[in-house]
Image: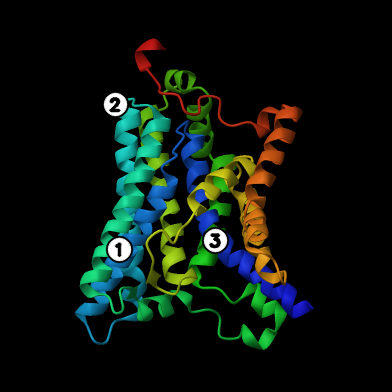
Amino acid sequence: MLETLALVIQRAVVQGIPLLYGSTGEIITEKSGNLNLGIPGIMYVGGISGVIGAFFYERSTENPSSLLLVLIPLLASILGSGLMALIYSFLTITLRANQNVTGLTLTIFGTGFGNFFGGSMAQLFGEGGSIALTQTSLAFQTSFPFAEKLGSIGTIFFSYGFLAYLAVIIAFISAYVLKKTRVGLQLRAVGENPATADAAGVNVTRYKYAATIIGGAIAGLGGLYFVMDYTSGVWSNGGFGDRGWLAIALVIFALWKPNVSVIGSILFGGLYVIYLFIPDLARSTQELFKMLPYVVTIIVLIVVSMRKKREYQPPEHLGLSYFREER
């Protein structure tokens, strides 16, 4: 029984890490007042960028360096997803385009971008119609060597690759910066009332750009983790499913607090895979179980709306363009 419970928790963590990256990145973005619905597309681009970098490095040498096997796809993922966030920033901050429409457009573009390059590489270079980055995946999946000796404790806490621990560290650092530092205070001020922040000497445009690009780069790492760790280096078109949207839903569940999203991501991951551990479930019933994260988010949203506490609400200027001349 204990071993089964440990396995459930482990699977929940593995499933939840991409959501944690996506939600942490989106929380940072939304704290600046930008609502980036392009997170699912950014995660796709982060994943395929890492795949492209890893693929060409693996093909370029017979004895790849373990450090470069990790570093090249990591930097490629950050660059690709950061560029997507930069495009979103330019359109919504500089050109003041509608944030909802721009975000949805980026999601469609990012999904198509990933599927096009992933499918093209599989046809041109893949074996059996797919790309398998075995060496890179093993480098990303390397866990603590003593995990197996600790039984269930090792399974729950020490059986993951470094990206899983990095996701938790980034979430807690983000929570600290947002709540305890001057930078976090000014960022929150920009998201709540950019006109007041501007009058106080805060560079609103700079904060919005920085938060959106950094948030996008963090979200992109969720796509990289999914490919290199969750699917063991195998790219599959459409394989991400609805995880990008789950990450956005998790932002609401976490009440715009990155530290809470750590727990929320594990819970969402558990709800998403729990049906795998229930015997003799019909396919239709499995799909109902997959709806649970969204149902829980709706319930949390209703409860939060009823309590009407300001600390539980999104930034007041979320989704709205800032026009400095109207200050």
Q: Can residue 203 be seen by looking at this rendering?
A: no
The amino acid sitting under disc 2 is Leu
Q: Quadrant of residue 157?
A: bottom right
Of the two numbered discs 1 and 3 on the same chain, state the one appearing first in sequence: 3
Give the residue type that dot 3 points to.
Ile
| Cα distance between the residues tagged 2 and 3 | 34 Å
* Residue 297 on image: x %, y %: 65, 43
Q: Which mark is residue 17?
A: 3
What kind of element bears circle 2?
A: loop
| Image quarter of the C terminus | top left
Q: Position of residue 224 (x, y in %)?
A: 41, 63
The label number, if any, that marks residue 135 in the structure image: none
Whole-number angstrom distance, CA of label 2 to CA of label 1: 31 Å
- Indicate the secondary structure of the residue bearing disc 3: helix
- Mark 1 residue element: helix
Task: Tell me which numbered mark, 2 or 3, is placed earlier along the sequence.
Answer: 3
Residue highlighted by disc 2: 95
Front one among 286 and 201? 286
- Measured in 3D between alpha carbons, the distance from the residue under mark 1 to the one under mark 3, in whole angstroms, is 22 Å
User: Looking at the image, which is closer to me, 149 or 286?
Assistant: 286
> What label does residue 118 carry, if any?
1
Looking at the picture, the colour scheme in use is: rainbow
Query: Which callout, 1 or 3, points to the residue nearer the camera?
Result: 1
Amino acid on which disc 1 is placed:
Gly
Q: Could you tell me which residue is drawn at 26 percent across and 60 percent down? A: 117
Choose the circle earlier in sequence order: 2 or 1: 2
Q: Quadrant of the N terminus?
A: bottom right
